[in-house]
């Protein structure tokens, strides 16, 4: 366990303690620091406080940070497509049909298994658990770019950019039917489906804000549309749910797609590729952007649908 001792100066009088800790203990997220307060790991002048406690001059804060709990996942030597790597993060181009994080039924051959082998001990451990650098995820059958953080500083920085919707995330997809407008914005909250809790849906009552920008790249024989999709937010299944709500579900989507239409070729899942990823570098402060080529199956499908 690590113990930090802090003394409040005149610049932070009447500041909430959770906000103060977020600014002074930057290697941890605000939500984790709030959890430590709830878990009675934070004392002010030797007494327990709540997250909304307003600080006073010369308050003595004692913060007890538990040791990081190791994640029980095996490391595997997998063939990872690493687009970029430095001391803060690596960018991986994930293939279709690969799960990002171990879960029931998928404990091996996931992206995390491969990252653990490649990076060894150089991974972030945010929120008290050794999380192998995962800041965001993409679905098993979505291909494309992911950022993996090697240290807590990078993890907190990029997670904060995700939270503030300042990261560039552009996808390309093929959807059913001909989109008439050249571009548009879908602004509809997403939450759990009201009857099937395993699915996501447009949910105006309990959903979270979700915004997707779409732009037509090419119309394919008046039956399909090749589109670019830019995420302003990042809700679970956001693109798939939003496009289905416009009656343009993703080709190959066996959950949100049409049940009465057969795909022109056999597919592993939705035709969706995370093509572009950009953010402020956590160490240099400069904007960096990465792009990836479309996977072979996507290119071949495009050529088939053009004929």
Image (spheres, grey):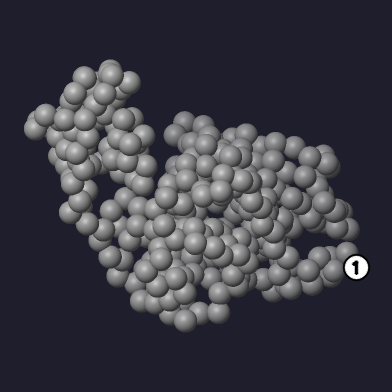
Viewed as shown, does residue 9 lie left or right of 174? Answer: left
Which quadrant of the structure image shows residue 67? bottom left
Q: Is residue 279 visible?
A: yes
Q: Is residue 196 left or right of residue 30?
A: right
Which residue is painted at 88% across and 64% down in the image? 306
**x, y (%) of residue 102?**
40, 68
> Residue at horizontal 50%, vertical 79%?
78
Tell me the quadrant of the picture where the C terminus can be found.
bottom right
Q: Quadrant of the N terminus?
A: bottom left
Locate residue 185: give its quadrant: top right
From the top left corner, tell me how far across and down residue 162 is, in percent: 52, 44
Residue located farthest toward the right when viewing the structure as drawn: 307
| Residue that carries the numbered disc 1 in the rendered image | 307
Q: Nearer the viewer, residue 294 or 175?
A: 294
Categorize mark 1 by other alpha carbons within 10 Å: few (<14), some (14-19), many (20+): few
- Callout 1: SS: loop
Q: Position of residue 8 (x, y in %)?
A: 24, 26
Q: Report the residue at 56% width, 44% height from top.
A: 285
Vertical comparison of 147 with 58: above or below: below
Where is residue 36 drawn, in percent x and y?
A: 22, 42
Q: Which of 272 and 252 lies nearest the eye of the viewer?
A: 272
Question: Quadrant location of residue 59?
Answer: top left
Q: Is residue 196 visible?
A: no
- Asked if 104 appears above or below 56 in the picture, the reply is below
Nearer the observer, 10 or 49: 10
35 sits to left or right of 44: right
Q: Residue at x 47, y 81 (%)?
A: 77
Q: Residue reaching furthest bottom?
A: 77
């Amino acid at each position: 366990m690590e113990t930090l001792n802090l003394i409040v100066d005149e610049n932070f009088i009447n500041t909430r303690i959770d906000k103060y800790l977020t600014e002074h203990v930057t290697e941890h997220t605000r939500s984790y620091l709030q959890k430590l307060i709830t878990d009675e790991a934070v004392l002010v002048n030797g007494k327990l406080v709540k997250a909304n406690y307003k600080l006073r001059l010369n308050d003595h804060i004692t913060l007890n940070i538990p040791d990081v709990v190791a994640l029980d996942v095996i490391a595997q030597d997998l063939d990872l497509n690493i687009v970029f790597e430095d001391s803060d993060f690596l960018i991986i181009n994930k293939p279709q049909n690969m799960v990002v994080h171990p879960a029931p039924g998928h404990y091996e051959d996931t992206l995390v298994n491969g990252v653990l082998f490649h990076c060894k001990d150089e991974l972030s451990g945010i929120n008290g658990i050794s999380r192998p650098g995962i800041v965001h995820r993409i679905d098993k059958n979505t291909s494309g770019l992911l950022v993996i953080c090697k240290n807590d500083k990078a993890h907190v920085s990029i997670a904060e950019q995700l939270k503030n919707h300042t990261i560039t995330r552009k996808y390309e997809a093929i959807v059913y039917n001909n989109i008439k407008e050249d571009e548009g914005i879908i602004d509809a909250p997403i939450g759990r489906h009201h009857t099937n809790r395993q699915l996501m849906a447009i949910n105006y009552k309990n959903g979270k804000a979700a915004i997707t920008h779409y732009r037509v790249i090419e119309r394919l024989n008046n039956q399909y549309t090749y589109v670019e999709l830019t995420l302003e937010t990042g809700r679970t299944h956001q693109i798939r749910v939003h496009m289905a709500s416009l009656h343009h579900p993703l080709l190959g989507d066996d959950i949100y797609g049409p049940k009465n239409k057969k795909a022109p070729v056999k597919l592993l899942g939705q035709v969706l590729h995370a093509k572009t990823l950009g953010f402020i570098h956590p160490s240099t402060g400069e904007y960096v952007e990465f792009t990836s080529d479309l996977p072979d199956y996507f290119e071949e499908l495009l050529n088939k649908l053009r004929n």
